[in-house]
Amino acid sequence: MKSKVGIIGAGLGGLLAGVALAKKGYKVKIFERLHRAGGRFTNFEVKGFQLTTGALHMIPHGNNGPLARLLREVNANVKIFEAKPEGLFRVGGKDYTYAKVLNLFPLVERVKLSFILTYFKYGKGSDEILYNWLSKKLSHPLAFKITDSFCGWALSINSKQISTREFIAITKNIHKLRGPGIPQGGCKGVIDALVQRLTQLGGEILYKSEVEEILVEDNEAKKIVTNKEEHEFDVIISDIGPKRTLKLCGEENFPKS
């Protein structure tokens, strides 16, 4: 008998988990409170334009990245176009490539930047906040604007919210795996392919089915309770974030250490 898996949330993470498990032979059922799949990783049409629900229509590292690899592993039919150029910096209303944006800095700052960029490529970094680290080495405001722009694009944070170690890990991946790719059909193209693949593998998505509780017995998640009925599973996966998951399970089931 197939093991039954219940997944809460039909966003990108929930769908990837569901399709991967269905491919391995599990019986998968996904609960989604909205009328559609995708969460913050999809798009919808408004007056002929495709608007995203949150995520940018790009896949980290294109066909070389971890998401593209997972999509191939589960045989989801997604075409990814490599971004050329990989990225541009818009300064003062003009676009500059990675190489040309350095020419906007004075000679002394360019020399400093060359050493810093080399360190970002080969160094290890530390727990020191990136902004503080850069402040000791650079003074030109454009350097900090570009850094914050990059951090915002990559992680939705700024240079005061990330360590040099974390930042260097990201830049190394870009050097190794290259820049982003654009999925055909935008984010929704990825979601539609995963939904189609899940259906092919016998999985199911219950839309407009908000989960009210995860029943825990003997320290194990046993049942998913929706606004309609109870569903029992061998494995329960929540992809709605730790805070909402904790609330569904009940804080009493997670004693403080």
Image: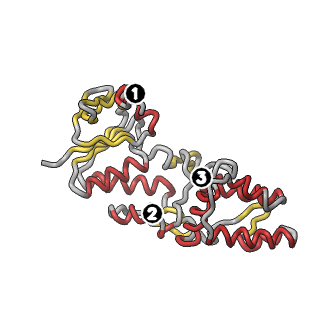
The residues bearing labels 1 and 3 have C-alpha atoms spaced at a distance of: 29 Å
| Residue 93 seen | no
Q: Earlier in the sequence, mark 1 or mark 2?
A: 2
Q: Residues within 10 Å of mark 1 (few under 14, many from 20)?
A: few
Q: Which of the 4 image quarters holds residue 189?
A: bottom left
Pointer 3: what residue? 155
| Disc 3, SS | helix
| Residue 242 seen | yes
Taking the spot 52% from the left edge, 70% from the top edge, the residue there is 177
The residues bearing labels 2 and 3 have C-alpha atoms spaced at a distance of: 16 Å
Q: Earlier in the sequence, mark 2 or mark 3?
A: 2
Q: Are marks 1 and 2 in contact (CB under 8 Å)?
A: no
The residues bearing labels 1 and 2 have C-alpha atoms spaced at a distance of: 33 Å
Taking the spot 49% from the left edge, 49% from the top edge, the residue there is 41
Taking the spot 66% from the left edge, 53% from the top edge, the residue there is 128
Q: Position of residue 140 (x, y in %)?
A: 84, 60
Circle 2: residue type: Pro
Q: Residues within 10 Å of mark 2 (few under 14, many from 20)?
A: some
As rendered, which of 145 and 254 lies closer to the eye? 254
Q: Are marks 1 and 3 in contact (CB under 8 Å)?
A: no
- The number of numbered badges drawn on the structure is 3
As rendered, which of 48 and 50 lies closer to the eye? 50
Looking at the rendered structure, which numbered label has been put on residue 251?
Answer: 1
Looking at the rendered structure, which numbered label has been put on residue 66?
Answer: 2
